[in-house]
Image (spheres, grey):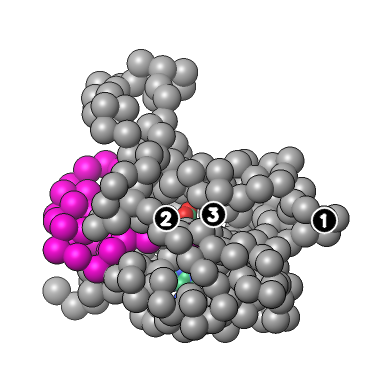
Amino acid sequence: MRDGAVSSGVRVLPPNDPRQYDDLAGEWWRPDGAFAMLHWLARARAALVPPAARPDAVLVDLGCGAGLMAPHLAGRGYRHVGVDLTRSALVQAAAHGVTVLAGDATAVPLADGCADVVAAGELLEHVPDWRATVAEACRLLRPGGLLVLDTLNDTVLARLVAVELGERLPTVPRGIHDPRLFVDDRELVAECARHGVDLRVRGIRPSLPATVGWLVRRGTGGAGPGGRGRAPRIRPTWSTAVLYQGRGVRRG
Ligand SMILES: C[S@@+](CC[C@H](N)C(=O)[O-])C[C@H]1O[C@@H](n2cnc3c(N)ncnc32)[C@H](O)[C@@H]1O
């Protein structure tokens, strides 16, 4: 079927086509919706960000989507600036207090060294040129500034778990990933080092019992407040082979 054709009322788009985010615009802020796992990851990513060390501190959130980090950063003292290609998501981010900029994460109209923190959550595995995105993230960071990110590794296991299995579960939209864009963790560390950021990575995964409980509750209409129950926590794990987090400081 041709790209963007309509089948049974649903538009069929190629894997990773950004127009999918417009089609899913109503899902962003539903904790039990198609982007549920992004909520869990946003919380875990925000936990890597310390309170701002100075007044007027800026956190640039590349590929911010609908601004899911915003509630977890509240009270930490940052101006939360979000950059994204998807305007329907930026409208929602703005409604959650994010200062939004429509644009490409590889060409951000902000000055070198403007950011105390740069976040790139679940972005690198969606961009055609992750190296250019990393270069831009590092350019935006002031010396001593912090880069936090999470992404999917370029492994067979990641393809199996995140695409073949994950996209069959209600926590990840089907067709949202193109595994050819997944990012090797060692190459990412080397690329960050080239741009002055010493990145440390660790594997992460959702808590398995909590995820099974969440799926059961969701499938049966929910047992918790609002019909949902508690969201699974993201835990460190020994292997970076599927999903991993990175944290690194820009050299002065
Ligand atoms: C999986 S979502 C992650 C959103 C958000 N970081 C989060 O964790 O909730 C990927 C986001 O990246 C955005 N995106 C994809 N390619 C981009 C690019 N080249 N520049 C800016 N944003 C991009 C999409 O529009 C989408 O909002």
Closer-to-camera residue (58/100): 58
Q: Secondary structure at mark 1?
A: loop
Closer-to-camera residue (191/225): 191
Tag 3: residue type? Ala
Rendered residue at 85%/55% (across/down): 55
Rendered residue at 46%/18% (across/down): 225
Rendered residue at 57%/78% (across/down): 196
Q: Which label sits on residue 240?
A: none
Image quadrant holding the C terminus, namely: bottom right
Q: Can you give x and y, in whole percent of width and height, for residue 3 in the image? A: 24, 76
Q: Secondary structure at mark 3?
A: loop
Q: Which label sits on residue 66?
A: 3
Q: Quadrant of residue 169?
A: top left
Q: Which residue is mark 1?
A: 54
Q: Which of the marked residues, 2 or 1, is nearer the chain's N terminus?
A: 1
Q: Which of the marked residues, 3 or 1, is nearer the chain's N terminus?
A: 1
Q: Which residue is mark 2?
A: 245
Q: Secondary structure at mark 2?
A: strand
Does residue 73 appear in the picture of this structure?
yes
Tag 1: residue type? Arg
Image quadrant holding the N terminus, namely: bottom left
